[in-house]
């Protein structure tokens, strides 16, 4: 089949790779000049399928966005829709589908990394830091879920946490930690570049600086770029992240997608060696602040915040200070602020916090987007699933609950 992909973020690139692996003739249209220029550029790096959950699930509400500025009030209808998605049966089905997709995705990522010998600053292990008894109580629903689904985890006391992460500051109160040895982190952008090279090796073509202006569903379906000739394809997969909604609306597909902004700081470690080690060994999550701290090679990436409204280009100082403060509480003086990279990105979010994966309802148009907080963690699996569906085969796992019909 001749297949077009719109968007070369982590989701588009992995989809291109999987479709090219299946022998399809793939063309990727990307508005900007390289892969992973938007949300996949400098995200937190966390690959934590264990923590995946739709918002309606007990203990998962922290992922909900906070309103920022007057502009946020324009999103009230969306927030109302988010509130209404909490029907228990739907939430349970989504939780199950997300968990399976997350685990499947991690396995696919590991298999690809091994088979293709990919290096992308991977670090295994994730520790959720709980400062108080109250924070421990708040994660009880998560613990129950992990127990029920047989997911490996360890509830660690403070001493064990410090043994896992010897650089943790003694002076910062720590009550307990949830250690998820099977989760971890890696550099999403680096992986996207590696996968682009692999996709190209399999014959996929990337057209950079080529915004898609319109999509015409049908058999064949047509891609209309902003400049140049329209082209026909047997299928089009839309992986356009936060910018997908207007394009899809014009093609007859309505998606209640919003952009929720977050920030990262990536800073070089002051010292790479030392006793105790001068920074995180793996990935930590500050449960109170909802901030992640990830070791990426000889750097640390701190990530957090969840703003609905505001502007992607306005990198405010206060949120960045919050990230530095959290890192400094746990690892004082570990990084050099000079030479640090500050970044603001937008997550594409649907009202239930789950991605949409599969047919669009319009002939020839497929959807792989709205991965919100976990697009990096879910990309490899979503791509594999989509490649099977587009080829007319059965998906390797049940993703019915992540279909578009749930948003109607
Ligand atoms: C601060 C922050 C921290 C995060 N931390 C994590 C984390 O720790 N773990 C995790 O799993 N996820 C994390 N995420 C989420 C993750 O980064 C995203 O879910 C993921 O990158 C989405 O990938 P994507 O390919 O769908 O979108 P994007 O990377 O945004 O790619 C979409 C692409 O489509 C292109 N495009 C759009 N419209 C058009 C058009 N009309 N024509 C041509 N091209 C077009 C864009 O230029 C862009 O390149 C984080 C996000 C943020 C903002």
Image (tube, rainbow, N blue to C red):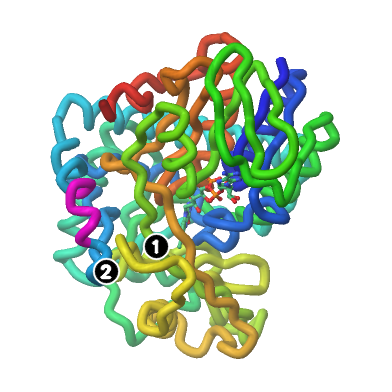
Q: Could you tell me residue 399's position as x and y percent?
A: 41, 22
Q: Which quadrant of the view contains residue 386?
A: top right
User: Which residue sits at x=66%, y=39%?
Assistant: 225
Vertical side of 29 occupied by 237: above or below? above
* 305 falls in the magenta region: no
Q: Is residue 93 left or right of residue 8?
A: left
Vertical side of 407 occupied by 45: above or below? below
Q: Could you tell me residue 323's position as x and y percent?
A: 41, 77
User: Which residue sits at x=27%, y=69%?
Assistant: 68
Magenta range: 73-79
**Residue at the disc numbered 2:** 68
Q: Which mark is residue 261?
A: 1
Labelled pair 1, 2 in contact (Cβ < 8 Å): yes
Q: Is residue 59 left or right of residue 277?
A: left
Q: Could you tell me residue 147's position as x and y percent?
A: 28, 37
Asked if ligand 1 lies within 8 A of label 1, the reply is yes
Q: Earlier in the sequence, mark 1 or mark 2?
A: 2
Of residues 312 and 124, the one drawn nearer to the viewer in this rendering: 312
User: Which residue sits at x=75%, y=42%?
Assistant: 207
Q: CA distance from mark 1 to mark 2?
A: 10 Å
Query: In the structure shown, which secondary structural element does the residue marked by tag 1 occupy?
Result: strand
Q: Is residue 154 left or right of residue 140?
A: right
* 74 falls in the magenta region: yes
- Quarter of the image with the C terminus is top left
Q: Residues within 10 Å of mark 1 (few under 14, many from 20)?
A: many
Asked if residue 400 can be seen in this view, the reply is yes
Of residues 408 and 393, the one drawn nearer to the viewer in this rendering: 408
């Amino acid at each position: 089949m001749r297949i077009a992909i719109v968007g070369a973020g982590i989701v588009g690139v992995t989809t291109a790779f999987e479709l090219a692996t299946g022998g399809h003739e793939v063309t990727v249209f990307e508005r900007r000049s390289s892969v992973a220029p938007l949300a996949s550029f400098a995200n937190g790096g966390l690959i934590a399928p264990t923590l995946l959950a739709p918002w309606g699930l007990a203990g998962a509400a922290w992922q909900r966005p906070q309103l920022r500025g007057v502009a946020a009030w324009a999103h009230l209808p969306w927030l109302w829709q988010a509130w209404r998605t909490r029907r228990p049966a739907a939430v349970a089905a989504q939780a199950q589908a997300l968990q399976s997709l997350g685990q499947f995705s991690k396995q696919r990522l590991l298999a690809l990394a091994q088979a293709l010998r990919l290096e992308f600053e991977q670090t295994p292990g994730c520790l959720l830091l709980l400062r108080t008894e109250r924070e421990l109580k708040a994660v009880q629903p998560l613990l129950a879920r992990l127990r029920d689904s047989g997911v490996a985890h360890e509830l660690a006391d403070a001493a064990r946490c410090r043994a896992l992460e010897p650089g943790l500051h003694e002076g910062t109160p720590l009550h307990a930690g949830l250690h998820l040895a099977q989760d971890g982190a890696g550099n999403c952008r680096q992986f996207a570049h590696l996968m682009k090279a692999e996709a190209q090796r399999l014959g996929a073509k990337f057209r950079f600086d080529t915004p898609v202006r319109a999509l015409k569903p049908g058999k064949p379906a047509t891609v209309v770029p902003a400049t140049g000739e329209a082209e026909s394809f047997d299928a089009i997969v839309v992986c356009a992240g936060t910018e997908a909604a207007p394009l899809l609306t014009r093609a007859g597909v309505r998606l209640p997608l919003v952009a929720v902004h977050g920030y990262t700081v990536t800073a070089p470690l002051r010292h790479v060696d030392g006793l105790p080690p001068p920074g995180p060994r793996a990935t930590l999550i500050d449960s109170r602040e909802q901030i992640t701290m990830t070791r990426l090679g000889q750097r640390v990436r701190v990530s957090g915040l969840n703003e609905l409204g505001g502007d992607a280009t306005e990198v405010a100082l206060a949120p960045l200070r919050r990230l530095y403060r959290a890192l400094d509480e746990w690892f004082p003086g570990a990084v050099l602020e000079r030479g640090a990279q500050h970044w603001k990105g937008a997550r594409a979010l649907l009202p239930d916090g789950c991605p949409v994966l599969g047919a669009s309802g319009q002939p020839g148009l497929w959807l792989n987007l709205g991965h919100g907080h976990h697009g990096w963690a879910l990309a490899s699996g979503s791509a594999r699933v989509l490649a099977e569906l587009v080829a007319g085969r059965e998906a390797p796992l049940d993703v019915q609950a992540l279909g578009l019909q749930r948003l109607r």
